[in-house]
Image: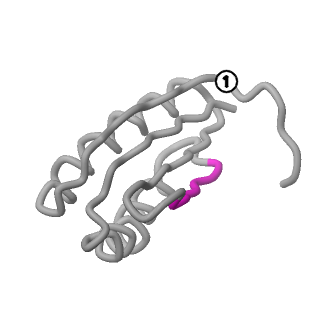
Amino acid sequence: MYMTIRHYRVPPSKMEEVVRRVDEVWLDRLSKLEGFESYFVTQPDDSHLTSVSVFIEEEAGRKAAEASAEWVGSHLSDLDVEFLEMWQGPVVVHGGE
């Protein structure tokens, strides 16, 4: 498995709309990509979101990360979402389903 973690700054007043778009639009698109395993978004505080996507193989994970960057740029730029960091790599420990 291959994991990508992306971290964003979001204006607190726009957080609800960002989360709605990710949930209703992006997740549907992402889940249809080849090798999709799982996707999570956490809100560590009132002005940040962190997404975690897991794909079966590295190539699929890298392609999904590129698609994510494109989608955020074209669908969330009007909400002043700022990409901060990304980490990628193979999953080395896994538990659960």
Residue 42 inside the magenta-drawn segment: yes
SS at mark 1 in the image: strand
Q: Position of residue 87 (x, y in %)?
A: 51, 28
In this view of the protein, which residue sits in the foreground, 87 or 69?
A: 87
Taking the image as shown, residue 40 lies to the left or right of residue 18, namely: right
Q: Which residues are magenta?
A: 37-43
Taking the image as shown, residue 75 lies to the left or right of residue 4, namely: left
Residue that numbered label 1 is attached to: 90
In this view of the protein, which residue sits in the foreground, 5 or 44?
A: 44
Q: How is the image coloured?
A: one colour
In this view of the protein, which residue sits in the foreground, 77 or 84?
A: 84
The amino acid pointed to by label 1 is Pro
Q: Position of residue 91 (x, y in %)?
A: 72, 29
- The C terminus - image quarter: bottom right
Check the image and report above or below for 42 versus 52.
below
Q: Position of residue 49 (x, y in %)?
A: 44, 55
Instruction: Count neighbours of disc 1 (C-alpha within 10 A) and say few if under 14, some if 14 to 19, many if 20 or more.
Output: some
Q: Residue at x 63, y 30 (%)?
A: 2
Q: Quadrant of residue 92?
A: top right
Q: Going by the picture, which residue comes out furthest to the right?
A: 95
Q: Quadrant of residue 25?
A: bottom left
Majority SS type along the magenta span: strand
- The N terminus - image quarter: top right
Q: Residue at x 18, y 63 (%)?
A: 79
Residue 91 inside the magenta-drawn segment: no
Q: Residue at x 60, y 23 (%)?
A: 89
Q: Residue at x 64, y 48 (%)?
A: 37
* Count of numbered labels shown in the rendering: 1
